[in-house]
Image (spheres, rainbow, N blue to C red):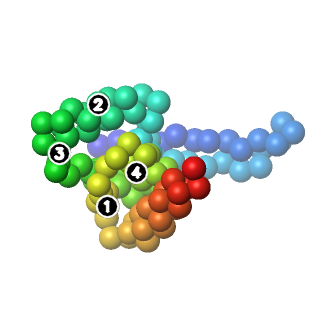
Amino acid sequence: MQNFHLCRIILKNSKVLATKIDPPFHTLDQEGVKELIKMGIEKGRKSRPDLEVGICGEHGGDAQSIKFCHRVGMNYVSCSPYRVPIARLASAQAVLEEKKK
């Protein structure tokens, strides 16, 4: 099995400051799936109001994905143990950001 990675190059004044390699699919493509996920949650809760909705895997431990999950109304995220500190921090930040609005 091959591992594919995305390479981001950080530029300033046309000079390369750093490169960062990220495995793809670790962060939800919010532009591509936002409406689909929202629709699934809304329709599911219409027929079952107490429906628990969450996400697991790499997305469950990614800060940006966790904040997205909170915004669309998910109840929980699940992730590997080494990502729990990031998940807890991102969850708290999502709640605080919501309260600022």
Label whose residue precedes the other's in the sequence (3 or 2)? 2
- Determine which quarter of the picture holds residue 45: top left
State the CA–CA distance, disc 3 to disc 4: 17 Å
In this figure, which residue is indicated by the disc labeled 4? 70
Q: Nearer the viewer, residue 36 or 8?
A: 36
Mark nearer the N terminus (1 vs 2): 2
Q: Secondary structure at mark 4?
A: helix
Sooner in the amino-acid sequence: mark 2 or mark 4: 2
Q: Are marks 3 and 2 in contact (CB under 8 Å)?
A: no
Mark 3 secondary-structure assignment: loop
Image mark for residue 79: 1
Whole-percent x, y for residue 51 in the image:
17, 48
Disc on the earlier residue, 3 or 4 = 3
Say which of marks 1 and 4 sits in front: 4
Q: Residues within 10 Å of mark 1 (few under 14, many from 20)?
A: some
Q: Earlier in the sequence, mark 1 or mark 3?
A: 3
Residue type marked 2:
Met
User: On the picture, is 50 further left or further right than 62?
Assistant: left
Mark 1 to mark 3 CA distance (whole Å): 25 Å
Q: Amino acid at mark 3?
A: Pro
Q: Identify the element where label 2 is drawn.
A: helix
Front residue of 6 and 60: 60
Under mark 4, the amino acid is: His
Quarter location, residue 85? bottom left
Residue 49: numbered disc: 3
Three-letter amino acid code at the position of disc 1: Cys
Image quadrant for the N terminus?
top left
CA distance for labels 2 and 4:
15 Å
| Residue of label 2 | 39
In the displayed structure, would residue 67 be above or below residue 84? above
